[in-house]
Image (spheres, rainbow, N blue to C red):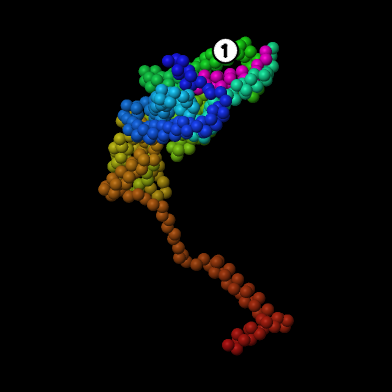
Amino acid sequence: MNHYFDAMFARKEFLARLLAHSFNSPKGWLELAISILLMLFTYWISKKIIVKFRFNERLVKFPFLRHLILRLVWPVLLLVCTIFAIFIWRVTMVESVLWLQLVAFTARWMIAIRIILSVLHNAIPNNYFNDHYERNLSKILWVCFILWLTNLDTFIIRLLKSLSLPIGSTNLSLFTVITASITVGIAIIIALWLSRMTEQHILQANRLDVNLRYVLAKLIKSLFVVIAVLIALPMVGINLTMLSVFGGALGVGLGLGLQKIASNYVSGFIILADHSVRPGDRLNINNFTGYVTKITARFVVLRSSDGSEALIPNDTFVSNTVINDSYSSRIMSNNLTVQVAYNTDLPKALEIIKQAAIKQPRTCEEPRPNSYVTGFADSGINLYVNYWIRDPENGFMSINSAILLEIWNRFKEEGIEFPFPQQEVRILNDEADPIALHNQALTGATAEQNLNNLANDPNNHSISTTQTSTHDQ
């Protein structure tokens, strides 16, 4: 049986010659037709199965397993059916297969590709591994399959092994470097996948402090990545002592250009360990107020009430002053100012605005809302109501609107007036001042004398004519 499966998945030598022979043989065309019909039939059956199990309640609870199963239905079904077809073909035709074996190769490689892409989807966040990268990676894997199928991979591997790179006292072939990079990448992806699964379990452990959960999740993630690198490098024949060269270069890089990144990374552990910043805290930093929605290795995400987000580097919280409105308590105080007319019954108005705040379900019972008289303004008396809210992350706009609307309705019921700015302009008709009348008479006489002088001037014909015509009229 082992020999049978080894022969089934063994590469065909001189594939081009075999394909040409198949096209010149009736049995070759028959085998090609059977292969095409087999792919179409299994694809149609797989669509029926996918539609039936897409919304299965048991699979919905496990999104990765559901995604993987739905992606593997067709290639697995195609591989199983092709294996049976190859067995029947060899029994009935007593002839070696070509097209069916190529279909089996393709189905097996499709299974491998879809498993790899499913693992990448689950291990890497969607914003880093999107459809564009998935299509490109899928094309690369299919090119590798074609190279393996045509036996061109042997020539490429020999060429890469002949090219060596001197690193320290050791020479590494280009093939070893590429293999090591791929192996380390796969190991890191698996480590990230395991760390994400572990992180989900840790973050759901309500018995632990929130910051302690984040610290453990980051430490486990870093530990998994380091272990993955240490395991992957010896697998491809790279001695770990060679890493001393890269360790020295990394130290110089951290001392020069990467010190800011290292500072942010260390600061992230510090702010989590000393509980100065926690998810959900309301912070005010650099004139930006928002709630902590995410703490990463390099920055903290603050989301404001209008939806905008700020990425604050971790070292900012260590070296600068940060206002944490919810450091010791998550409840927050807010206030509203209302103005009433001067003829208002102030004790009644104060009780109304206080009860309007108490009536709201989001306000805290302790400390209780209270109201005060804060000043006598030009148009009315200023009243002030103060209350505490237990869920400031939901904003203050809605509760402020509800309190003001309640005050408006109650004031209308009690006949309490809201003042509006008004100004009075008075025109006083007092007796004329004798001195002002004397000055006015002098001013009129002077003007009349100037007019007469202009009229008697012989050079000023226009004025004379005008005066003459006026007299005539």
Report x, y in % for residue 161: 64, 18
Residue 267 shows up from this direction: no
Report x, y in % for residue 164: 68, 18
The part of the chain drawn in magenta is 170-190
In front: 223, or 440? Answer: 223
Q: Residue at x 42, y 57 (%)?
A: 424
In front: 18, or 451? Answer: 18
Near mark 1 (Cα within 10 A), the count class, few <14, some 14-19 or many ≥20, is few
Report x, y in % for residue 41: 39, 34
Residue 469 shows up from this direction: yes
Q: On the image, numbered disc 1 is attached to which residue?
A: 234
Q: Residue at x 32, y 50 (%)?
A: 417
Q: What secondary structure is marked by label 1?
A: helix
* Extreme residue in the left direction: 413
Quarter of the image that includes the N terminus:
top left
Residue 257 magenta-drawn? no
Q: Name the side, left or right, on which 173 lies relative to 321.
A: right
Quarter of the image that includes the C terminus:
bottom right
Against 404, residue 465 (above or below) is: below
In front: 286, or 196? Answer: 196
The overriding secondary structure of the stretch rendered in magenta is helix
In front: 228, or 92? Answer: 92
Q: Name the side, left or right, on which 150 lies relative to 379.
A: right
The quarter holding residue 202 reads top left
Q: Amino acid at mark 1?
A: Pro
* Extreme residue in the bottom direction: 472
Q: Residue at x 58, y 15 (%)?
A: 236
Q: Residue at x 33, y 41 (%)?
A: 403
Report x, y in % for residue 185: 54, 22
